[in-house]
Every structure is written in structure tokens, then in C-alpha cells.
Image: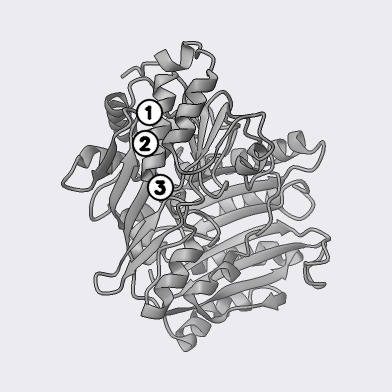
Amino acid sequence: MTMTTTAATEVAPPVLAEDLAALRAAVHGPVLTPSDADLAAEAATFNLAVTHRPSIVVGATCADDVVAAVRWAGAHRLPVAVQATGHGPMQPVEHAVLVTTGRMRTVQVDPVRRTAQVGAGARWADVLGDAEPHGLTGVAGSSSQVGVVGYSVGGGMGPLGRRHGYGADLVRRVEIVTADGRLRQVDAERDPDLFWAVRGGKGNFGVVTSVEIDLVPVPSLFAGAVFMSGSDGAAVLHSFRTWAATLPERASTSVALLNMPSFEAVPDVLRGRFVVMLRFALDGTDAEGDALLAPMREAGHVLLDSVGRIPTTATDVIHQDPRDPMPVWERGGLLAELPAGAVDALLGSAGEGLAPHLAMVELRLMGGALGRPARIPNAVSGREGAYSLLTLGVLAPGSAEAVQAEAKRVHEALAPWSTGTAPVNWLGPSATPAEIAAAWRPEVFQRLLAIKERVDPTNMFRFGHAIVG
């Protein structure tokens, strides 16, 4: 299958003032050009390493605005990109129409059906907050500030994933504007091929304006983080590899090697240190959680322990992801197993003092529902992984080359245990078209290409982790 690239190679005609006026008349939200002072703020990303320079920004307030923007872009032979919270962009959007959906932040929880209707701009914090009074929650990721739609269309892996699956697995229905400017309602009965593809195929098929998702009956968790001295890294990681494999599916965990910054906001006991951070979450009792966690609490010198009973609205304490924008570079992959040799390879490439430009090197336990097919099949990548591997660096001035070199060294050291695939949301900014294709099994990728050819034959949606033949 070879993707048509007509729209990518043609030169778009200049936008006339009357054409711009027509677009502004067709949408309810703002329409901005590079001459507008508000464009930079509207197009700003959470990852400050990426700066968008679109030709037009449409601040959508509803699905009709998205339809108008896509139709206008098609008439002017311009590609389209979409952004909600700004967490997802990997490359700059240039010479394109950028549709921002942050104003579409509606959430409607149905406690009887245990579902939520979620607008394109809603964050997980919005869903968790509205669901919690009903004893329900969503299968969110490590940060509640991430958008529900972007997280879900890329798969979405969080603390409840081993019990309930990927975020995409719990999507019941998708409302999407495709390249022809049609607003489509797709589910297992209506266009099941497109429904399969958009859940795991990222933004390659259109602009998702809303999703209906299943909620799960989890009122609270025994969860949090344990920080241990980096000098005990070998003992902690070797204990982790044997301990994690024994956990029930109701438990999730990850371990991260962290070079902590010397910021005032960082607790004194962690500031400027190399530490090991163990994350843990259990849908179970405190007594069960304490018993399960005991071997790891004894594996190294504990500097800080925040694990305890939390409401589902407080799950950010598990991973403690940054809440403020910053420039970062990341690369992810999957491991088929974690034997002693893999732990030694990790310590030999990212142990204390060996990767000073990497803020984090993380191993996350997968398996359980993350390794099983979804109830309604979808295109999510990564089910074959036993552990995920993520390397991340903060791009201080002049550090980009060192960050990428250190990350490359870690991934090369662990290559003997790699599956060769990756969670598509974690591919990072440097992924080549071949690496993007390899995120999925070959037969899955070929099916994605065929559906892409049908719904977006001119490759209008080609930003981010774009699929090409």
C-alpha cells in the first residue's frame, strides 16, 4: 500500500482576505494568523522543545467549528493538525491549519451506564473529578493534565491498565471529522474499520471531537511513591525484577532512575540527588497493599514514602509528573522480559553518574489486561511487552546532543531484550517513518494504511507520528 501524497507536494495557493473572512464567519471560536499577537499563546505546547508555526489557527468551540476548519483547509489544500492540551506534539506544525480543541472541555458522566461523554479538549482531571462522587473513575495515565482524546487514540497506559486495559480499550464511540469534512459517529457497528483504526492509530484519520468511554468502579486506591537512595540502585532493581512478576493484576508498578534537579520545590532529602523511585498502585485494601509492598520497602534505604490511601482524583502522586511546561526529549520501547542481565545492562548504561543528562529512565510493568486483546478489537500497539522502557531528558541549552546520546546508549544496551515495537504514544520526536511503522505488528500496520488511504487519500492529517507506506 502506497499513500497518496498529492496534498503534501502541491504548493498551497495564498490565502486571500475574503477567504479568511469566510472562515471567521463559519466558526464560533477565534481564527488567528501569524500577524495576530494571540497566535503564539493559542498554539503553545506543554513540551517547550516544540514550537508550532501554523498558517492558521482555529480555536474550535464545537464540532461544527472543526467541520468548518477541515473543509476550509481542504479547499485551500492545507494540511490539518490538532492540539488540545499541548502534551502530545512531537514535531512543529508548519504551513498548516492548527485546530485547537481546548475550549471543547465538556464531560457528561452517566453513573448508571458507567460511561462518560468527553469533549475533545477535556483533561483526565475533568473526568476523574466528575466521576469520583459516583465511586467511578477513568483509566487515566500518569498525569491528570493530559487530554483524554489524545491519550486514548494513541492507546493510553496508566495505573489501572493491568486490571482494565488501555484507555483505547474502554472507548465505546468516537465522533470524528474526516478529511472530506464529514462529522462521523463511529463505533463497533458504524464503520467498524475506522473505529478499529482510530483507537490506537493516533491522529492519522481525522480530528476527534468527542469520545464515549467506559468508567470503572474504583472509588480509591492504595498508591503513591517510594524514593530510595540511588546508591542502592542495583539491590532495588534486582529486587524489582523478581517482585514485580508476582503482583496480581489489581496492582501496577514502575521503577525509575532519576537525576533530581536542585529546585527549591524538590524536597530537601531528594534535591540534586540520584535516586530510585518506585511507583505503586493497588485496587485493594491497605493491609494487602502494605503486605505486597513490604519486600520493596526493604530493598533499599528509603528517603521518602508517600504510599497510602488516596482518592482517584489524586493519582498524580503516583508518578509525580511535572505540572509546568518544559522542553523535553523522550524515547520509548518495550522489553519482552527483564532477566538479571537486562537489569545489569540498564545499570551499566544509566546507573549513578552514567547518564547525567537524562532526567529519568523508567521501567513499567505491563502484562495483565495490557497484554490481552481488547473486548472490541483495536489498533493499539504494545500488547506484546512485558515491560515498557522510557528515557527522558530536559533540554537545557546545549544539552540536546548529550541527552540523545545517553538515551541511545540505554536503548542499545537493552536491545537484546527488546520486542522491536513500542507504545506509539512513547515513540518520541526522533522516530523515523520506519520506526513508526514498526510500532505495530506488520499486519496491523498494513491494515492501518489501507484505512488511511480510504478516509484520508491526500494525507491531510500528517503531523505527529504519521503513518506512510
Q: Residue at x 43, y 50 (%)?
A: 120
Q: Is residue 247 visible?
A: no
Q: Work out whether 59 lies above or below 130.
A: above
Q: Mark 1 and mark 2 in contact (Cβ < 8 Å)?
A: yes
Q: Which residue is mark 3?
A: 62
In this picture, residue 30 sits left or right of residue 34: left
Residue 161 position within the rendered picture, expressed as x and y whole percent measured from the top left? 40, 62
Q: Which residue is mark 1?
A: 71
Q: Work out whether 145 lies above or below 40.
A: below
The quadrant of the picture occupied by the C terminus is top left
Q: Mark 1 and mark 3 in contact (Cβ < 8 Å)?
A: no
Q: Residues within 10 Å of mark 3 (few under 14, many from 20)?
A: some
Q: Amino acid at mark 1?
A: Arg
Residue 397 position within the rendered picture, expressed as x and y whole percent measured from the top left? 82, 39
Q: Residue at x 50, y 84 (%)?
A: 291
User: Most extreme residue toward the left, as rendered?
Assistant: 189
354 or 106: nearer the viewer: 106
Q: Is residue 61 visible?
A: yes
What kind of element bears circle 3? loop
The quadrant of the picture occupied by the N terminus is top left
Q: Mark 3 and mark 2 in contact (Cβ < 8 Å)?
A: no
Q: Which residue is mark 2?
A: 67
Residue 232 position within the rendered picture, expressed as x and y whole percent measured from the top left? 72, 67
What kind of element bears circle 1? helix
Q: Amino acid at mark 2?
A: Val
